Amino acid sequence: MLRLGKSLKMSEELIVGYIVAGLDDPVLSKAIPVGTSLQQLESALQWQKELGGLLHQYSESQVTLDDFERLADKMEQIVLCGDRLMESLHGNQQVLQTIGTELSSVLRQQRAALSCNLSNLGTSKTHQIVVHLKTNVSGDSEIKLQPAGCHVKSRSLQTSLISHLTCNVIQKSSSAPVLQLCNVRELIADLSHLNGAICRESPNHLHAESLLPALSAFRYFTTLDFDGGHLQIPLAPGSRHYFTFGTPYGAFQFQRAPKHFANTTIIFNKILIELARKLPTGDVVVLNDTLILPCRDATEGLAQLSRTLAALGAFGLTAHLRRSRFFEQQVQLFNWIVQHGKVISIGLPLQLPVSTAYRLVLMISECADGKTFESLLQEHCKANGRVRVVGCFTKHIHQEGNDKEVQLGTHLVESIEHFRQFLAFVSFDLLLEVSLQDLKEHSVRKALLQVQQFDFELKINSQCNIK
């Protein structure tokens, strides 16, 4: 058909249309939009062939998770313009490597939760292929501390593969991508419906000035995670060029805007990558459905955050602002274990006691040879009634000299903020075991002052005679 089309001097678009129609493949017909080039068609055919081989292999033997991840990653790269995705990654290389390593591991372990889910996008039409895989849990991810009745033998992983450019919310653009905003008010007027659907109050646009004071002492990576939702709000024709993005196959633009953002990774990346291009180089990292600001320094980090929030405000978008922490220690919270920044479930989801008769207690040990937690907990129960231990963190200090105080402070601050993150900011008591010398030298008080947005009332055990 290709040779015949070239001999008849047919257009490339027409040749592709005849080839797709002749193959009579409903999956391929949905995956190939109007205006697709021959190169894109070849990529789609190769993907179909590889997917068919994988499904055939699955029906006869066991497909490993690595086989599926390789194919899923390849498809995402096709949609995200392949190597051009790397152009959106800027910043300190060590920071990017740290974030990339952690999130890559999370994607492999929790692909079902983070994968593309485009099964329902309002009026848009999509094609979704779901493959169920059963694979044994690897030895390094097995958890020794398991609740009764929980047996980890195998798990069923549901992962989605979607055809590239399947949504009719994305159409061929008649104009080149716009690099700068020309009329911000027009876009905000359209997206005011977006914000109105999110919150019943007036549209909530981001204002950097009101957020920066609260972030003045953030010590970790800052992430901007947008509200979840689907592409449902029509864009006015005059505003569509703001959502134009370039691909190796030409320029495309969105016909509909998100009601609010979601785990639709591919759609999300296209918007965020285009948004990142409007920001100064190095200010933002686009990873999946999150904007990550790779900064630790307070002065420089706040300047980057200010520019990023200003750019988002011009789009009229709302976002949840969070801090992303990557820990080297392993901690346990009820039936959750967090190690190297990853949350691993060892049972049912966390259920906090709802009775007001309970007081939540987090126990942290800062000394290797102090008295046991049991006696401290008994004393706390006598003073406060019924308690529920929500976490226990113990660390043995091997450093000597001046490094000890630094290690104690870092350990204390990170463990408190770590548990506070997963307790969703509910109130809890901190039962701290420290040496008498550390308490006299006020190193504990100095460390507690580093914890942001946390009210402390330091009560010393009556058995400690401190002047």
Image (spheres, rainbow, N blue to C red):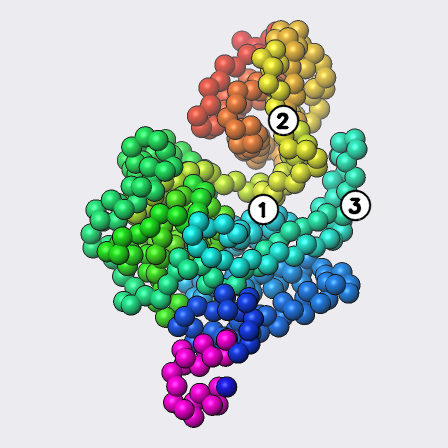
Q: Is residue 175 visible?
A: yes
Tag 3: Cα neighbours inside 10 Å, few (<14), some, or many (≥20)? few
In the picture, measured across the screen, residue 5 lies left or right of residue 62, that is: left
Work out which quarter of the rendered image holds the C terminus and state it. Answer: top right
The residue depicted at 71 percent of the width and 24 percent of the height is 369
> What residue type is disc 1 on?
Ala
The residue depicted at 79 percent of the width and 39 percent of the height is 151
In the picture, measured across the screen, residue 461 lies left or right of residue 321, that is: right
Q: Dot 2: what SS?
A: loop
Q: Position of residue 353 (x, y in %)?
A: 62, 20
Q: Dot 3: what SS?
A: loop
Dominant SS in magenta: helix
Question: Is 343 in front, or is 4?
Answer: 4
Disc 2 target residue = 351
Q: Is residue 14 magenta?
A: yes
Question: Is 384 in front, or is 85?
Answer: 85
Q: Residue furthest bottom?
A: 7
> What residue type is disc 3 on?
Lys
Q: Position of residue 117 (x, y in %)?
A: 53, 51
Q: Answer yes or no: do the residues labelled 1 and 2 have beta carbons within 8 Å? A: no
The residue depicted at 48 percent of the width and 28 percent of the height is 451
How far is the residue under mark 3 from the one under mark 2? Answer: 24 Å
Tag 1: Cα neighbours inside 10 Å, few (<14), some, or many (≥20)? some
Number of labelled discs? 3
Q: Which residues are magenta?
A: 2-21
Q: Position of residue 209 (x, y in %)?
A: 28, 35
Tell me: residue 144, above or below residue 60: above
Tell me: residue 460, above or below residue 322: above
Q: Quadrant of residue 177?
A: bottom left
Disc 1 target residue = 113
> What residue type is disc 2 on?
Gln
Q: Position of residue 294 (x, y in %)?
A: 43, 48
